[in-house]
Image (cartoon, helix red, strand yellow):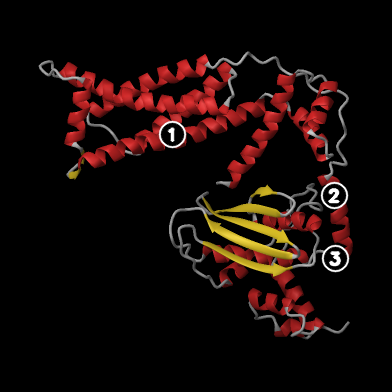
Amino acid sequence: MKENRFLTKFKEKTIAELQDIVDDKKGYQPEARNAAIQILKERDNILISEESGLDTENKPKKYDFKEFEASIKKEHRFGWTPKFEETFRVELNKTVFIPIITEVFETLDWPVIFKDENSVEAIYINSWGKHTEKIEVLFEHDKVTIKSISLRSGFWDMGRNSKRVKLFIHAFKIVMHEYDQESLNKLQIETEKINNWDDYEIPKILPKPKENKKPNVLIPIAGGVISALLLGFIIALTSTEGIYFIGLFEVGVAFILGFIFASLIKQSNYTNYKNLQLIFIATVLVTYIANQYFQYQIILYKNSGISISFVQFLEFRIEAGLSIKNLELGSIGLILSWVFQLVATYYIGMLRLTLALTSYELERVPGEVLEFAIYHFVKGKSKQEVRYELSKMGWSKKDHQDDVLKSLDAMHDLNEYDRAV
């Protein structure tokens, strides 16, 4: 067989140059493009485990993209949230496009955090374990849009977003070279079976529902009040000793309240989100009002000759203002610090409470029951029809069926939380 003369000629070319040759169907003859493909495959050595006894046939192929990544010319972006975007067209249907995109992310070791019938999202994790970029791939009418968005604070992405996008496009092309029409047809059949849950076997029986305690709103109310008073007293003790770290204390209080409310939710079986939100807001307010009141009482105790009302104490505090070492921030600085206390504690604490509530709602329903409900939704049944199917399998009470539907909503909420990393 005649040796491809371009193999030697292209030997010194970079991966980026070789990829351009492969993509330029009009500018290069088939022999040249085949040589470029062969060299690319040789350089992107497939990393297959050599351990004996391991079945690697069905494992996703992985490549070493270090050389190409080093050759990428970065394009810097600036902004409140720097991002970089590119588009290209591809002759694929969306049924096979989504699993191929997922395979590309797996090849790059970028964890997938979300996917639907038109898009896939993943995150890039740096060597320190931090999430630095989110990569979104959208497929619309044969047009592919790849966008990388900075997750860390800063107005300059130092070219990282462009690097992620260009590396993804390169990896996509490499993966696509492994597919011919036959393998694409096979992938479409397999994907349609997965999407339609064709391999799901309806169980003969489902685990019995647990008898839940009657929801009791008094438990989170009482727990919130007691927690607020205890935390207010502790903060007052440390503050009057001159120990207070702005930011650190607020985060600490938020995490403690989030942990306490997670326990209160389980003890009370109370899951009304709006009411829990109101109770949490009240708890945060009581915590910091109690802090000021306990500081007032401690100061009176240490200075027995002073006789002022709590309102006068607050007036004196506002008049004195906020001092951080030698920095005088005045009354406005003090009031802003109080606002920061409330806002930071609320938002961080509510995030913890929301996650705890979501996890609790998922824990109440066995996985087999959730799969059963999802299967019937995938098959196009309405909520009422799914309730009927559940009732035939022993989940006949409305509150038990409500638990199933709430758990499905909780799964969706967790997915949305992952997307907002």
Q: Is residue 139 left or right of residue 128?
A: right
The residue to which callout 2 is attached is 192
Residue pictured at 22% horizontal, 24% vertical:
311
Between discs 2 and 3, the one toward the N terminus? 3
Left or right of residue 333, residue 99 in this image? right
Q: Nearer the viewer, mark 3 or mark 1?
A: 1
- From mark 2 to mark 3, how far is it between C-alphas? 18 Å
Q: Which mark is residue 180?
A: 3
Looking at the image, is mark 1 or mark 2 earlier in the sequence?
Answer: 2
Estimate the spatial distance between the alpha carbons at disc 1 and disc 2, rounded to whole Å: 44 Å
Q: Secondary structure at mark 2?
A: helix
| Residue 330, picture quadrant | top left
Q: Amino acid at mark 1?
A: Tyr
Q: Residues within 10 Å of mark 3 (few under 14, many from 20)?
A: few
User: Do we see residue 393 in this rendering?
Assistant: no
Q: Residues within 10 Å of mark 1 (few under 14, many from 20)?
A: many
Label 1 sits on residue: 346
Residue 161 visible: yes
Foreground of the two, 35 or 138 = 138
Q: Residue at x 54, y 17 (%)?
A: 217
Dot label at residue 258: none
- Of labels 3 and 1, earlier in sequence is 3
